[in-house]
Amino acid sequence: MPDEPAPPPGHRPWSAAMTDALYGERGFFRRHAGPAAHFRTSVHASPTFGGALTTLLLGVDAALGHPSRLDLVDVGAGRGELLAALLASVPAELAARLRPVAVEIADRPAGLPAEIGWTDQIPARVVGLLVATEWLDNVPVEVAQVGSAGLRRVLVNDRGEEISGGRLTGPEGRWLDRWWPATGRSGRAPGPDTGRVEIGLARDEAWARAVSAVDRGLALAVDYGHLLPGRPAAGTLTGFRDGRQTRPVPDGSCDITAQVALDAVATAAGRPFHLLTQRRALHALGVDGRRPALALAATDPVAYLRALSAAATATELTTPTTLGAHRWLLHPRGIPLPPRLSDVDHDLGG
Ligand SMILES: C[S@@+](CC[C@H](N)C(=O)[O-])C[C@H]1O[C@@H](n2cnc3c(N)ncnc32)[C@H](O)[C@@H]1O
C-alpha cells in the first residue's frame, strides 16, 4: 500500500485480518476441531468423492508409467481425511508405492496412518497427483468497494466493522483491470455503490507455486468460484460457523471464505489447464446419482439400501445448485489428461 495513509488503529486491510483470523496463533483453522465441524466440503460429503479421486489417481499413475514412487499431495488437507480415504482404497500394490503428504497449517491429528506425511510446505519436485480441495477460497483476499470516491480498499477491525481506505494501485490495480474490471477503474461504467470486489492476487500466486511444484503429473484444485463474465456484483466474502453461514468477523471464531476467480487462478498457473464443473468431472469418473432398480429391494434389501444411500450422496456431489457447481481446475504437467476426463466438455482451457 505505498501511497496510502496509515489506517486508524484497529483497522487493517481484509487480507491481513483474514490471515490472522484463520492462520494466526489463535486462528480458526489452528484452534478448532477441523473444517468438517463447521462446513461440508465434497471430502466430507461422501466416500464417493474419494472413490472418484482414486480413479483419477490410478489414471495419473498409468500415465506416468507406474513409477516406483508416486506422490500424492493434499494442499490444505484439513485433518487428512481425503488422504486416509485414498490410502485405504487403492490396490495394495499401489499403496506400497504411494507417498501421501498432507500440506497443512494445523497440527497433525492423532490417529492418522503413519504412512501419511505432514508438513506446512508444499514439497518440491512432485511426481504424481497434487490436490487442493477448498483451499483456494481460504487464501486471504483483499477487498475493495466502489463508492462516490471511486474504488477504495476496505479496512476492517476485529468486530467486522468496515471503513474505507486508500485507492488501489500497482499490481492490485492491474489485477482488477484484467480480472474484475467493472468497478469504476479503466474508464468503464462504475458499478452500484454497493459494488465490492475481491482481489485474488495472493491466491493466484499460491496456486501458481503449487502447480509449479509438480514436475510430472497432475495438479487439481476443486473449489467454488466465478469467471470474468459473471463476477458477483457485491463480492462473496462470508463466514461459516457450526455449519451455518454467518457474517465474516475476523476474530478467529469463524471460517472466512471468498469464492475463487477461477480464470485468474488458472491463467496464473499457466497452460495447459482445463476447467469444468464437478458435476461433469464426477460423471466422467463414473459417479452418478441414479437410483438402484426397485427389483433389487426384493432380492437383496441390504444391497438396495446401500446403493440408494450411494445414489443420494452422489446426487449431493453433482447437483448443479450444491456441490456439483464447484469447479475442477486441472493442470496436467508432462502427461496427457487422464482419458476419462479428456473427452469431457470443458468451460475453459485447453
Ligand atoms: C476449507 S479447509 C479444506 C479442508 C479439506 N481440503 C476439505 O476439502 O475438506 C482449508 C484448509 O486449508 C488449510 N490451509 C490454508 N492455507 C494453507 C497453507 N498456506 N498451507 C497449508 N494449509 C493451508 C487450512 O488450515 C484448512 O485446514
Image (cartoon, rainbow, N blue to C red):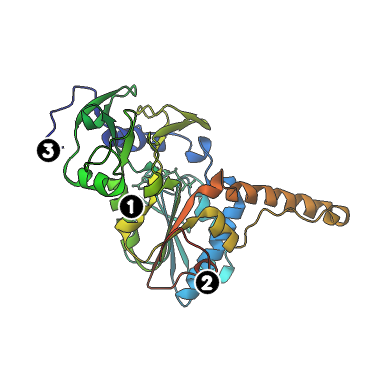
Q: Residue at x 18, y 22 (%)?
A: 8
Tag 1's secondary structure? helix
Separation (CA) of disc 3 from disc 1: 24 Å
Looking at the picture, does residue 75 appear above or below residue 5?
below
Of 110 and 326, nearer the camera is: 326
Neighbor class of circle 1 (other Cα within 10 Å; few <14, some 14-19, many 20+) is many
Q: Quadrant of residue 189?
A: top left
Q: Quadrant of ligand 1?
A: top left
Quadrant location, the N terminus: top left
Tell me the SS state at disc 3. loop
Q: Which residue is mark 2?
A: 339
The picture quadrant where one finds residue 64 is bottom left
Mark 3 vs 1, N-terminal side: 3
Q: CA distance from mark 3 to mark 2?
A: 49 Å
| Residue at numbered disc 3 | 2
* Identity, as a three-letter code, of the amino acid under mark 3: Pro
Q: Amino acid at mark 2?
A: Pro
Within-10-Å neighbours for mark 2: few <14, some 14–19, many 20+: some
What's under tag 1, amino acid-wise?
Ala
Q: Nearer the viewer, residue 35 or 323?
A: 323
Q: Nearer the viewer, mark 3 or mark 1?
A: 1
Can residue 49 be seen here? The reply is: yes
- Residue occupying image coordinates x 87% and y 57%: 299
The numbered mark at residue 236 is: none
